[in-house]
Image (tube, rainbow, N blue to C red):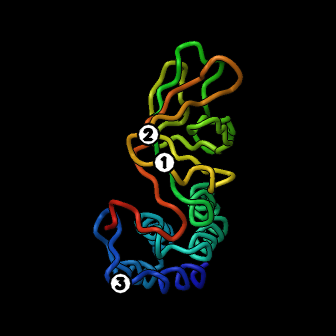
Amino acid sequence: MTELLRRAVALVPGDARSDSGASAADVREYLEQDEWEFALDLLGDFGGIAWQTSVYWKLLAAAAQELYLPSQWFHWREAETRLGLIRADLQLVPSTRNPIPAQGVLRPLWHVGGGDYRVAITWIESKPELEAGGRAIVRLAALSPEGWRHLVPGDVITMHEGQPVAGTATVIEYASVGETRQRDR
């Protein structure tokens, strides 16, 4: 696992900083002190979808598995490198039948404009689940990214699990594959 983390940190650009301000050099120091879990957390905290390749996230997922830690988030981020990043503010209707689990198991249809309905896996940020009538920031992994490329922040899309509408979401961030995220510009 140390080798996996060393290979991942080698992919971090010298000027990149994690959300907490750490650099690749900081991660290397933690690796030298055998602080593998902390180093993994720091590597997962780096922004910059343009430089984070599928290989980067696969290395982090493999390291997490070797450390017997959850790897789902790293797999999710790997998918974002292939499919793009869509974040939205979702408000469920009060009559939603079941809570939505956080970790990317729900695959509802989304009306994305025109007459188009598209499937996207849904990941809820910062909550274990989203209850009926609840509101949360979600990440969407569009299974056919080309159908979502027209979206811009402020667009409203609707979630469907049959009729009627299950929720309404306002797009707050969109970055296609290889594009730099707004916060990283």
Judge by depth and name the residue closer to the eye, 77 or 45: 77
* Residue beneath the point at 53% across and 18% down: 93
Q: Is residue 45 above or below residue 53?
A: above
| Residue 105 percent across, percent down from the top left | 68, 41
Q: At numbered mark 3, what does the secondary structure look like: helix, strand or loop? A: helix
Residue on which the image places disc 1: 151
| Residue 158 percent across, percent down from the top left | 55, 30
* Residue beneath the point at 45% across and 73% down: 35
Residue on which the image places disc 2: 155
In the drawing, does residue 77 fall left or right of residue 26? right
Question: Which quarter of the image is occupied by the N terminus?
Answer: bottom right
Q: Amino acid at mark 3?
A: Ala
Q: At numbered mark 1, what does the secondary structure look like: helix, strand or loop? A: loop
Label 2 Cα neighbours within 10 Å, binned few <14 / some 14-19 / many ≥20: some
| Residue 82 percent across, percent down from the top left | 62, 65
Work out how far the residue at label 2 is from the one at label 1, CA to CA, in angstroms. 6 Å
| Residue 156 percent across, percent down from the top left | 46, 34
Q: In this rendering, which labeled residue sits more in front, label 1 or label 3?
A: 1
Q: In this rendering, which labeled residue sits more in front, label 3 or label 2?
A: 2
Q: At numbered mark 2, what does the secondary structure look like: helix, strand or loop? A: loop
**Count of residue discs:** 3
Label 1 Cα neighbours within 10 Å, binned few <14 / some 14-19 / many ≥20: some
Q: Is residue 160 above or below residue 83?
A: above
In the drawing, does residue 1 fall left or right of residue 93? right
Which residue in the rendered view is the most extreme toward the top? Answer: 95
Q: Amino acid at mark 1?
A: Leu
Judge by depth and name the residue closer to the eye, 23 or 172: 172
Q: Amino acid at mark 2?
A: Asp
| 2 and 1 marks in contact (CB < 8 Å) | yes
* Residue beneath the point at 54% across and 79% down: 5
Residue on which the image places disc 3: 25
Pointer 1 or 3: first along the chain = 3
